[in-house]
Image: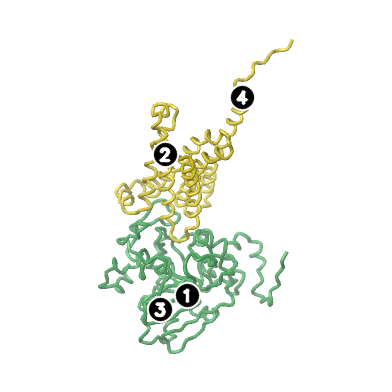
Amino acid sequence: MLIRKPADHLPSDITPESVYFNRRQFMLGAAGLLLSAETLAGLNAKKSPLSQLASNDKPNSLKEVTSYNNFYEFGTDKSDPAENAGSLHTRPWSVLVDGEVAKPRRFAIEDLLKFPLEERIYRLRCVEGWSMVIPWVGFPLASLLKQMNPSSRAKYVSFETLQRPSEMPGQRDAVLEWPYREGLRIDEAMHPLTILVVGLYGNVLPNQNGAPIRLVVPWKYGFKSIKSIVRIRLQETLPATSWNMANAHEYGFYSNVNPEVDHPRWSQASERRIGEFFKRKTLMFNGYAEQVAGLYRGMDLRKNF
Amino acid sequence: MTTLRMKSPVSTADRRLAIGKVLLFIACLSPLTRAAWIVLSGEAVNPIEFITRSTGTWTLVWLLATLSMTPLRRFTGQAWPLKCRRMLGLFAFFYASLHFTTYIWLDQFFDWHHIVKDIAKRPFITVGFAAILLMSPLALTSTQGWMRRLKRNWGKLHRLVYPVAMLAVIHYWWLVKKDITQPLIYAAVLALLLGLRLWWRARKA
């Protein structure tokens, strides 16, 4: 048997006894729990007033949120991420922010965790026609971008996921062109609903949900909310996005949740909330129209799907 | 006094076939039992999607198994594969019916307007629907009676199983969003099974 001895053990690396004996809880939290000190106390997040936006919707259970995931870096089945993401090391971790900014900077994950954290209960709508309600913990992307003093040429923001096939088995197949890429227009990125997420249900983000830091854009289909981010780049040109590169006919740049514009494979008029038997009607912009419709005034959303 | 036992009219070969068929029946039913267990125990996070996928997968498996019986007979020289063929074909239809019912009932909840639109608009649903339509007459005419009544036409009719299998593989292929490894495997097996037949025909001619 191979016994690997870690180079240096931080006290926080050691699993607390209570976690060790509470195995079920432990399995659910997966690797994220092992690695970080902030877990032990839970994330200290204030309830945001924006958290109330989906408050009529009952959040899905932790089990549902953490065992039914699309994260192709760990496999294409929805059960794959929960099974395979334990191999991902989320410490050390840094996010490079560069491009059209006064001073590019590499943020250590520890720096990012110093942003004031908020809980946001958001609806998540997958392009495949299912949805969930998730209590995320994070902070507005705008607070990070503002720190960077974007130049007037910063019209778009592009994002990249970690590429590390040794820990992300799905990347060993060219299912998509790695690393996974996503992008937003600058006003979408600066919108107060757009957040960088570091946790859910008050705890550190499990690996299968995009640890240690991911994007959440609640009025867009789930795949726009890129996971395990290592690079954020402000730029003048429209960023390439993975699903658009893979199949431009089916996945546009905007990918706003829109019940009136069908995907070639799935009608988008309705959705099945995980845990519910009957389908429910899909809401324009996933129910956030009041907040975001203004961003798209005058645009043909059939063309700019 | 010794009693003379009448020799059973059922030969050992027949008895073995009967036992084999019972075992095959249980094997064919086991994926359904497993799926039911997973759903009832609450293990599937999205049960309707799970049932749809599981019944779809097993329709394909039993279809390909049905098509394997003729080659198996030729390679082994045994008669039993052909005697199991009808059961396999009927199980393929059984799983296809469950698959279709899941779509109509659990997924769309008898929203006929939407179902008709879906079939017309989405190519993968169109071919899936075509496949089950073509399968139905095969299931209906699977009895001895229909075999007798249709005579030589029975064989002709049942060649519909080839387009059915092709449509089923295409249905799966077009449904997959990105990673086509799985449909590719089914397509390869089907190509082999149909290729063998073409090869035999070419050699005979």
Q: Position of residue A174 (x, y in %)?
A: 50, 66
Q: Are marks 3 and 4 on the same chain?
A: no
Q: Position of residue A255 (x, y in %)?
A: 36, 67
Amino acid, disc 4: Ser
Residue A270 versus residue A158 in the image, above or below? above
Residues at discs 1 and 3 in contact (Cβ within 8 Å): no
**Residue, x 62% and y 69% (percent of image)?**
A34
- Viewer-nearest of discs 2 and 4: 2
Q: Which residue is mark 3?
A: A157
Quarter of the picture containing the C terminus of chain B is: top left
Q: Which residue is mark 1?
A: A160
Query: Badge 1: few (under 14), some or many (20 or more) residues near its Cα, within 10 Å?
Result: many
Q: Earlier in the sequence, mark 2 or mark 4?
A: 4
Q: Which residue is mark 4?
A: B11
Q: Which residue is mark 2?
A: B159
Mark 3–mark 4 distance (CA, rounded to whole Å): 77 Å
Amino acid, disc 2: Arg
The front one of A69 and B77 is B77
Q: Position of residue A217 (x, y in %)?
A: 41, 70
Provide the secondary structure element on which disc 2 rests. loop
Q: Is residue B45 visible?
A: no
Query: Badge 4: few (under 14), some or many (20 or more) residues near its Cα, within 10 Å?
Result: few
Residue B83 versus residue A299 in the image, above or below? above
Q: Residue A148 is drawn in which quadrant?
A: bottom left
Q: Residue A299 is drawn in which quadrant?
A: bottom left
Q: Which chain is yellow?
A: B
Provide the secondary structure element on which disc 3 rests. strand
Residue A137 versus residue B191 in the image, above or below? below
Residues at discs 3 and 4 in contact (Cβ within 8 Å): no
